[in-house]
Image (cartoon, rainbow, N blue to C red):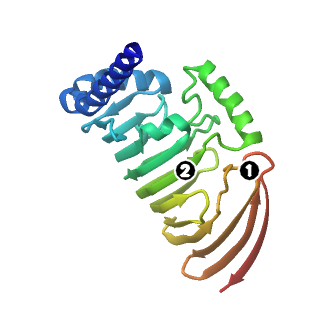
Amino acid sequence: MKIIKWGVIAIGVVVVLLLATIIIVPHVVDVQKYKPQIEKMASEATGRPLTLGGEIKISLFPWVGVSLADLHLGNPPGFKDKDLLTVKSFEFRVKLLPLLTKDIQVKKLLLDGAYLSLEKLKDGRGNWEGLGQSDRKAVAQSKKQSSKESATGLPIKSLIVGEIAITNGVLIWEDHAVEVKKEISAINLRVQDVFLDKPVHLAFSADVDGQPVSLKGKVGPLGKTPGKGTIPLDFVLKAMNQLNVSIKGKLVDPLSKQTFDLNLNISP
């Protein structure tokens, strides 16, 4: 009995020390000191130069969180823009302990000021090609895992998301072979209070070549196995201050069959 008693006490002490470490470490470790190593690892993983101009902040308990600012992901040689992607700020927080039981509890995912420039040269090369090919084994493993998830749905027990917000985004598409350039600016997406057993409400807006476009409505419930089964949706699309489209219907097995049944009602 004494052995059991002291064993329980020892385990308790270890747990307390572990929790104390998780809480204290982010406050005593200077993350900025490791920024060059982080940039190097990210550059090797993407195959592109990556720099972080702003401060990096991390937290470990009760929310695992990371925030960063002024991210730049470079272009290969020969392309017009210096960067493929720039991000003004990014913040992500997820609860730590529930992850052990595949219970995903995200407090927030915020992305502000993302600028993505997709460019295709006259010889057909795109600036996105080869991104991340420095780790082919990881890519192959990811494809294998993705195929498995398609058949069974996403491998999570539950999902709760407080807020997803993309603000002030810009997407540029330029094809030099046909001399076409398109710009989607003022991209804003907001999703709040996500649960598997309730409809997910979202609001999206942007300017497409200077013309306003918006999409508002709901999708779901997503069900106990997200990505599998029938998912209802109900949206209203508005474009160019003239077009009004009501979209109602359902998606069936979006991770595998990817079939849909939609009714469109267009009004001027």
The amino acid pointed to by label 1 is: Lys
Tell whether 263 sits left or right of 108: right
Residue located beneath label 1 in the image = 228
Q: Secondary structure at mark 2?
A: strand
Residue at image position (64%, 62%) is 221
Q: Secondary structure at mark 1?
A: loop
Relative to residue 78, is residue 118 depicted above or below?
below
Q: Any mark on residue 159, and which?
A: 2
Residue sitting at the far bottom: 268
The amino acid pointed to by label 2 is: Leu
| Image coords of residue 196 (percent x, y) | 60, 56
User: Pointer 1: residues within 10 angstroms few (<14), some, or many (20+)?
Assistant: many
| Image coords of residue 160 (percent x, y) | 50, 53
Question: Which sits earlier in the primary sequence, circle 2 or circle 1?
Answer: 2
Relative to residue 22, is residue 122 depicted above or below?
below
User: Pointer 2: residues within 10 angstroms few (<14), some, or many (20+)?
Assistant: some
Residue at image position (32%, 42%) is 67
| Image coords of residue 183 (percent x, y) | 50, 58
The quadrant of the image that shows the C terminus is: bottom right
Residue at image position (42%, 49%) is 115
Residue nearest the observer in this picture, 23 or 238: 23
Mark 2 to mark 1 CA distance (whole Å): 15 Å
The quadrant of the image that shows the N terminus is: top left
Relative to residue 225, is residue 75 depicted above or below?
above
Tell whether 157 sits left or right of 97: right
Residue nearest the observer in this picture, 222 or 254: 222
Residue sitting at the far top: 3
User: Where, by quadrant of the figure, is residue 170 drawn?
Assistant: bottom left
Tell whether 186 sits left or right of 267: left
Q: Any mark on residue 177, and which?
A: none
